Amino acid sequence: MDISTLGEALDAFVPEIMEHCGTPGMSIAVGVGTEVALARAYGVADLATGRPMTTGTVAPTGSDCKPYTGVAALQLVERGVIGLDEPIEPYLRVVNPHGPRPITLRDLLTHHSGLGAGMGNFDRVPPPPLGEHLRRVLGAERSDAYGGTMAPFWAGPVGARYQYSNVGIAVAGHLVELLNPDGVTFSEWVGRHVFAPLGMESTVFPRAQHPDFVPDDLLARRSTGYATLPGLRLPLPDLYPGDYPAGSALSTPSDHARFVLAILGGGSPVLSPDLARQMITAQAPGGTLFGPRPGMSVGFVFNVFGGEHPYIGHGGEYPWGWTHFTRGWTDDRVALVISANQFDLGDFGLSDRPGHAAARLVAELATAWVHGADPRPRRPLATGRAYLAGLLVGDRLTSRLGIASQPSPEDVARIAERAEVSFPWDPEAFREAVGQVRLTASPLADGAATMRRELPAHELALLARQLGVPGLATQLPTGPGPQAAGR
């Protein structure tokens, strides 16, 4: 795999992705084998000053740092301090009221403790020490989202179902703090035993992203985060999670990629091969923030996905200004990490928010490359947009309505000449595409085959969003029709 082709693809696609999603800046790293092979940065880290986004710009990872906490906890298992399936109650009293089974470290790291979903217990001031914070939260037994009115603190019995839990990961972090043989804070343990061995010199896991807890030089490199809505970007005040082992780390994509590569490569120098393997292989049924989802699996913290090129994934958001994204291909040993200084305020569903959509569109490029395809644009993107628009118009004028005759060349030329467009436009590509669509014996399958032949999936994902049909790729029939098969 020639990494330069992925670099060229990023340079071509990412500015368009950012413009479409309203993303101020984006930093991307791709690791291959044991090294960060590619790092790119686009846009600005701060709109007011014009400070550019760079590969050294530091940003909050949000929940994408939960695997750091997972590794720190598993390091205690390695040292024989606590067992994966040993009840945590002798060390920290956390009792699920829905049944007798005690909570174990395995339950916490697979989100099966029975603790419910929460937002992270944020506040406008840095939180107290972790033990004090958790005593208050566990004693109150009240979720923070909408003052406890949105979701129950306990979602069900231990082990019964997947339920993503920030408090659960904070409990795992507090176990690290209570039991580590160095007798240091959680932040110090992770710094010494995760970040330092991996050379993650731009990464910290503080109690709060605040001058009292983060070195000045690192805070000076932090991007400004923006809460966004269409046409609106707001730099909102800083907030701090009380459940900080679930989301308070600062890092760069290159540093985070080094961490992911280490886990993909057997864990050295931070984890044993056996525990590293368990971390990235299915340990329990998985799901999303909203609960279990059939077909999904979770390792230790990481989500686990199968297929010809199996991969792990996680992501994070830090209110209200940053989005983080990780994907690691386990067999290929490739890691993709994306950081964006954007957190959209709309409730479109997690994957459809502009910040998430931007990262997923970039991930389409990396996925194509990992699968052995050339991710560079097949044609100029303006031409691709016009071509896709032509296929859609051709479908509407023929197949969709069951009309066998095609529009005349004069009609098609007239449409192209009189079109009012707000983006770069290629009328010749539009006319060509309209002329390719016709009513056949299998119009849906044949049309899908034409679209897939002319527009690779990673291009189609962006072009369809730009034209306002983001679900188009997933709606295409997968089986070729008789005529498509004969081409």
Image (cartoon, rainbow, N blue to C red):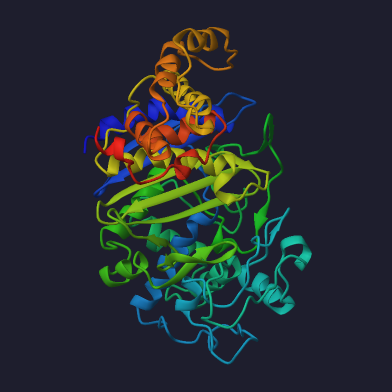
Q: Is residue 145 left or right of residue 354?
A: right
* Coordinates of residue 160 in the picture (x, y in percent): 53, 80
The quarter of the picture where the C terminus appears is top left
Q: Position of residue 206 (x, y in %)?
A: 55, 56
- Residue in the image at 39% along x and 47% along y: 255
User: Residue at the spot x=44%, y=10% of the render?
Assistant: 409
Question: In which quadrant of the rendered view does residue 254 lie?
Answer: top left
Residue 343 in sight from this viewpoint? yes
Q: Residue at x 24, y 40 (%)?
A: 372
**In-image side of 421 versus 132 (left or right):** left
Residue at the image point whose x is 28% and y is 72% from the top: 274
Q: Position of residue 426 (x, y in %)?
A: 45, 13
Position above or below: 245 against 233:
below
Position of residue 345 relative to residue 91, above or below, is above
Quarter in which the N terminus is drawn:
top left
Question: How many labels, in total?
Answer: 0
Pick out the residue farthest to the bottom: 100
Specify whether 406 is left or right of 377.
right
